[in-house]
């Protein structure tokens, strides 16, 4: 189950949220109760450092 946090709470707890993501959890961030972003870890997803260094295109979002 993905845990959801509002923007203010996510800002205050960013370090904790990143630890959760490193453990394989997904974190949803919402504004006014509507999801606007999802934090995912890179491990096991075929996303390496090279992919993180290149600019994102519309197909990547």
Image (cartoon, helix red, strand yellow):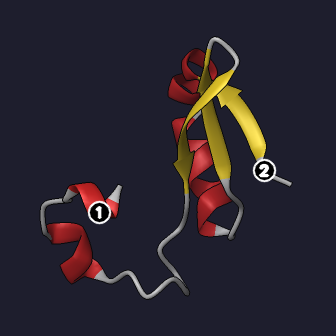
Please give the count of numbered marks on the rendered protein. 2
Left or right: 51, with 5 as reference point: left
Residue 16 badge: none
Residue named by callout 1: 59
* Quadrant containing the N terminus in the rendered view: bottom right
**In the image, which is nearer the foreground, mark 1 or mark 2?**
1
Q: Residue 15: image x %, image y %?
A: 53, 43
Q: What residue did someone put label 2 on?
A: 2
Q: Give the residue drawn at x 54%, y 51%.
A: 39
* Residue found at the far top of this picture: 32
Give the structural element (helix, strand or loop) at label 2.
loop
User: x, y (%) of residue 30?
Assistant: 62, 26
Marks 2 and 1: in contact by CB < 8 Å?
Answer: no
Q: CA distance from mark 1 to mark 2?
A: 24 Å
Name of the residue lying farthest toward the front: 59
Q: Residue at x 29, y 63 (%)?
A: 59
| Occupied quadrant, residue 29 | top right
Q: With respect to residue 22, does 13 lie above or below? A: above
User: For the C terminus, which image quadrant?
Assistant: bottom left
Residue 49 x, y percent position in the rendering: 25, 79
- Which quadrant of the figure has residue 56? bottom left
Q: Residues within 10 Å of mark 2 (few under 14, many from 20)?
A: few
Q: Residue at x 15, y 69 (%)?
A: 53
SS for callout 1: helix
Q: Residue at x 65, y 23 (%)?
A: 34
Label 1: how many Cα within 10 Å (few below 14, some 14–19, many 20+): few
Closer to the chain start, of discs 1 and 2, is 2
Residue 36 lies, in percent from the top left, at 53, 32
């Amino acid at each position: 189950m993905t845990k959801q946090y509002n923007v203010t709470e996510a800002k205050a707890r960013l370090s904790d949220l990143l630890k959760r993501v490193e453990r394989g959890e997904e974190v949803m961030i919402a504004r006014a109760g509507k999801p606007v972003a999802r934090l995912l870890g890179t491990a096991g997803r075929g996303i390496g450092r090279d992919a993180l260094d290149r600019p994102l295109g519309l197909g990547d979002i």
